[in-house]
Image (cartoon, rainbow, N blue to C red):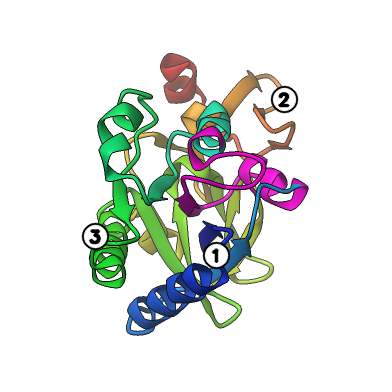
């Protein structure tokens, strides 16, 4: 899921942002949410601190209770993957803002072809997302885009005749075969069972005697067969 998170105290600007995002996203086969705020709120804070597949922030520089830069600092405390765009009425501040080292993707002036520049930036953002290490699949009639880094393990449930992708946020039972899904993964995923591949970067510990793998999010699985113990032990 892609979340577009807009924070601007100008209602007209928020509406323009929503319109541009919806128009650009329409031809693409992905699901997205648009969240709008007129200032920094508890709900916005919770969004920032809740793990998500992809967040794209469009932040006004000047806000009633916390500036766009201050919000960007809050984001970067917990998340260096999300994309941040700053809207400003003061182009001369761009160099100063760049020195904050917050990985701001773009600064857009509200007084210089605003809608056109925003359109170009959103298109660039979507292109950037398509080139990221992301796996796409259909689950419950929706298209999901999940960062590989968020996947804990993938396994085949023969009873349900489905492959399940387990992430830091959710579980996705899908119709694709395990073989097809594995082709979309990278080298951080290792096989631990004929029906399971795990993200080695998410492993907390392994009980090799009992065949149980414990993960960093306090979950565990017993998909560790004898044939794959040696390889996993060497990797860890």
Asked whether residue 195 appears in the rendered view, the answer is yes
Q: CA distance from mark 3 to mark 1?
A: 24 Å
Callout 2: SS: loop
Measuring from the top left, give residue 126's x and y in whole percent: 31, 63
Which of the two labelled residues, at mark 2 and mark 1, occupies the earlier sequence position?
A: 1
Proximity of marks 3 and 1: CB atoms separated by less than 8 Å: no
Which of the two labelled residues, at mark 2 and mark 3, occupies the earlier sequence position?
A: 3
Residue drawn at x 73%, y 36% is 219
Proximity of marks 2 and 1: CB atoms separated by less than 8 Å: no
Residue 81 picture quarter: top left
In the rendering, which numbered label is found on residue 137?
none
**Magenta stretch containing residue 47, yes or no?**
yes
Q: Nearer the viewer, mark 2 or mark 3?
A: 3
Asked whether residue 193 appears in the rendered view, the answer is no
Which of the two labelled residues, at mark 3 and mark 1, occupies the earlier sequence position?
A: 1
Proximity of marks 2 and 3: CB atoms separated by less than 8 Å: no
- Residue wearing tag 3: 124
Residue drawn at x 41%, y 73% is 21
Q: CA distance from mark 2 to mark 1?
A: 59 Å
- Left or right of residue 9, residue 138 in this image: left
Q: Nearer the viewer, mark 2 or mark 1?
A: 1
Residue drawn at x 59%, y 34% is 224
Decide: few, some or many residues near mark 2? Use Cα within 10 Å; few <14, some 14-19, many ≥20.
Answer: few
Q: Reply above or below: 29 against 135.
A: below
Decide: few, some or many residues near mark 1? Use Cα within 10 Å; few <14, some 14-19, many ≥20.
Answer: few
Q: Which residues are magenta?
A: 42-70
- Residue wearing tag 1: 10
Q: Nearer the viewer, mark 3 or mark 1?
A: 1
In the rendering, which numbered label is found on residue 210?
2
Q: Reply above or below: 153 against 100.
A: below
């Amino acid at each position: 899921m892609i979340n577009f998170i807009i924070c601007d105290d100008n209602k007209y600007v928020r509406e323009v942002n929503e319109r541009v995002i919806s128009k650009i996203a329409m031809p693409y086969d992905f699901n997205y949410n648009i969240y709008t705020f007129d200032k920094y709120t508890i709900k916005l804070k919770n969004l920032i601190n809740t793990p998500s597949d992809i967040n794209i922030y469009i932040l006004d520089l000047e806000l009633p209770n916390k500036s766009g830069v201050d919000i960007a600092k809050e984001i970067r405390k917990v998340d260096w993957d999300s994309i941040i765009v700053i809207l400003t009425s003061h182009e001369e501040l761009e160099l100063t803002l760049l020195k904050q080292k917050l990985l701001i993707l773009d600064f857009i002036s509200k007084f210089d072809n605003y809608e056109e520049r925003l359109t170009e930036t959103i298109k660039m953002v979507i292109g950037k997302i398509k080139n990221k290490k992301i796996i796409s699949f259909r689950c419950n009639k929706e298209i999901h885009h999940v960062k590989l880094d968020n996947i804990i393990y993938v396994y085949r449930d023969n009873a349900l005749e489905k492959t399940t992708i387990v992430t830091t946020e959710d579980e996705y039972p899908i119709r694709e075969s395990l073989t097809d899904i594995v082709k979309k993964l990278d080298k951080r995923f290792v096989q631990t069972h004929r029906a399971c591949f795990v993200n080695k970067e998410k492993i907390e510990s392994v009980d090799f005697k009992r065949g149980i793998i414990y993960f960093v999010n306090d979950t565990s699985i017993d998909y560790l067969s004898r044939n794959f113990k040696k390889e996993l032990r060497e990797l860890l």
